[in-house]
Image (spheres, grey):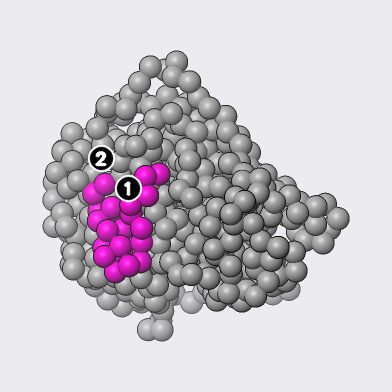
């Protein structure tokens, strides 16, 4: 055997225990996966949700991403159903604010973990925490089992339909369906929460989003740009600074680094780099801005937040034109409305910021790998071009996709539909009956004006809030 990366070994073959049989197995308990599991269970499917951490919520809990964007657009709510039910459940526990007109709803990650877990268990979903998807078994084009690795070793679970909500299309790739990955991926971000911040002085930043865009302090951003230009700090985004439910607490989206989360060695280097830069940036905030002079690190994400890696080759690719000129897709299973927002991996900027003038429709076919019989996806691995993905990737839309995918999976079990030959009318009727918004009222004149936007920067604090 030779040494180095080119060396290979043959893993000894062995029989695996089949630990359970289900109608639907969902791999990944992020925003899309947890909603997909609830939808499948509520539609009568015996459902298992496999999650690598000891809680669900994905980027909203493990990576601290907040707010969850977005449920409303220009005064109209376009995401309802199970996703909105979850946010209301968190709000009842004082862990979310669902009253904001923009539909960008802040969440407390700890409360959301509890609300989501309760929603899953109340819906009859079986949870399997601390289990990492490893492989699958195929038979004549169908997935028959998924294999997971956990403290019990390698075990298998059988199902009739599978939903890949891993974010990185792990099950799709293991099953041999084609995927694509861009030459330049959107960067990753390590979110963090600070205590000891003068939130009264920063109150001017804690306004609701306008046209889906959260305010950014020009004073803070411009100083950070100066420091970046002289190589005192690395590239950054925003910063987007959100009040975090208590006086003195904020949640910050600031750190940014190019990476590929599907490359374990590269992503490990990214995690190490961003955690070093986290403490550098906190020192800079303390030194440069009086509002942060006494701040302290309350929490950082247990993992870096990932925006993009693999995409499936789906039955349809959601494109920029579908965002800007909504189509009446017969298989609409979700709606989106977020600004087209592509974070640069090599600078402090956002690329191609465009605000859709109305919500758009997301078809099921974007979630179905070409040739799939019993596999569907939901979340950020969907089939989309760069600008299309720049809008549809956000968490509220991923949740809505989850309800569509979970419902489709349950109907496939109960009626024998193939994922590539779904009964779209039956699917939409079922979604509508369960509160999902999948109407076609938003299909408008293709000449509707499109607005190119920039940061809604706040140049300075209002006079009454200025500090010395």
Residue depicted at 68% across the width and 71% down the height: 293
Residue at horizontal 66%, vertical 61%? 467
The quadrant of the rendering that contains the C terminus is bottom right
Whole-percent x, y for residue 257 in the image? 67, 57
In the picture shown, does residue 41 fall above or below 375?
below
Q: Secondary structure at mark 1?
A: helix
Secondary element at image label 2 = loop
Q: Is residue 373 magenta?
A: no
Report if residue 281 is visible in the image.
no
Task: Residue 77: give x, y in percent of width and height.
Answer: 30, 41
Q: Which residues are magenta?
A: 80-102
Q: For the residues labelled 1 and 2, say whether their Cβ atoms are less than 8 Å apart.
A: yes
Expressed as whole percent of the image width and height from the top left, the position of residue 418 reads 24, 43
Residue drawn at the location 18% of the way across and 34% of the way down: 425
The relative height of residue 316 versus residue 309 in the rendered view (above or below) is above
User: What residue is pinned by disc 1?
Assistant: 400
Indicate left or right for 281 with 328 as reference: right
**Vertical arrangement, residue 421 with respect to residue 155, above or below:** above
Find disc 2 in the rendering and name its residue: 437
Magenta residue check for 90: yes
- Of the pair 83 and 132, the residue shown nearer to us: 83
Seen from the viewer's position, the closer of residues 18 and 317 is: 317
In terms of image quadrants, where is residue 420?
A: top left
Q: Is residue 54 left or right of residue 285?
A: left
């Amino acid at each position: 055997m030779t040494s180095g990366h080119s060396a290979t070994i043959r893993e000894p073959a062995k029989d695996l225990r089949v630990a359970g049989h289900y109608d639907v197995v969902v791999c990944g308990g992020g925003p899309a996966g947890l909603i997909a599991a609830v939808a499948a269970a509520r539609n009568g499917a015996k459902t298992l949700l496999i999650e690598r951490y000891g809680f669900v919520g994905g980027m909203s809990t493990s990576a601290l991403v907040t707010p969850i964007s977005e449920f409303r657009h220009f005064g109209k709510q376009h995401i309802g159903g199970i996703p909105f039910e979850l946010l209301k459940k968190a709000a009842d526990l004082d862990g979310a604010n669902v009253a904001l007109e923009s539909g960008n709803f802040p969440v407390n990650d700890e409360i959301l973990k509890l609300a989501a877990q309760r929603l899953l268990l109340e819906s009859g979903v079986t949870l399997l925490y601390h289990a990492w998807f490893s492989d699958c078994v195929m038979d004549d084009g169908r997935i028959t089992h998924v294999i997971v690795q956990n403290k019990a070793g390698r075990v298998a679970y059988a199902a009739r339909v599978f939903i890949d909500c891993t974010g990185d299309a792990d099950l799709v790739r293991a099953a041999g369906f084609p995927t694509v990955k861009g030459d330049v991926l959107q960067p990753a971000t390590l979110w963090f929460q600070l205590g000891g911040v003068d939130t009264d002085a920063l109150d001017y930043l804690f306004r609701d989003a306008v046209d889906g865009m959260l305010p950014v302090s020009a004073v803070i951003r411009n100083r950070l740009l100066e420091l970046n230009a002289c190589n005192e700090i690395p590239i950054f985004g925003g910063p987007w600074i959100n009040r975090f439910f208590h006086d003195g607490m904020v949640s910050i989206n600031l750190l940014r680094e190019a990476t590929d989360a599907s490359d374990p060695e590269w992503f490990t280097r990214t995690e190490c780099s961003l955690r070093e830069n986290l403490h550098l940036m906190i020192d800079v905030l303390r030194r440069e801005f009086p509002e942060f002079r006494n701040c302290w690190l309350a929490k950082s994400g247990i993992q870096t937040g990932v925006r993009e890696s693999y995409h499936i080759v789906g039955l349809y690719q959601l494109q920029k034109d579908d965002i800007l000129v909504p189509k009446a897709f017969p298989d609409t299973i979700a709606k989106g409305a977020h600004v087209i927002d592509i974070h640069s991996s090599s600078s402090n900027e956002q690329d191609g910021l465009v605000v859709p003038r109305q919500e758009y429709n997301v078809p099921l076919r974007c979630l179905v790998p070409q040739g799939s019989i019993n596999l569907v996806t939901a979340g950020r691995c969907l089939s989309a071009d760069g600008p299309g993905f720049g809008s549809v990737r956000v968490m509220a839309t991923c949740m809505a996709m989850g309800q569509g995918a979970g419902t489709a999976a349950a109907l496939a079990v109960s009626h024998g539909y193939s994922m590539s030959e779904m009964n779209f009318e039956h699917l939409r009727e079922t979604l509508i009956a369960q509160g999902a918004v999948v109407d076609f009222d938003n299909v408008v004149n293709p000449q509707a004006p499109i607005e190119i936007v920039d940061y809604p920067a706040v140049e300075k604090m209002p006079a009454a809030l200025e500090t010395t």
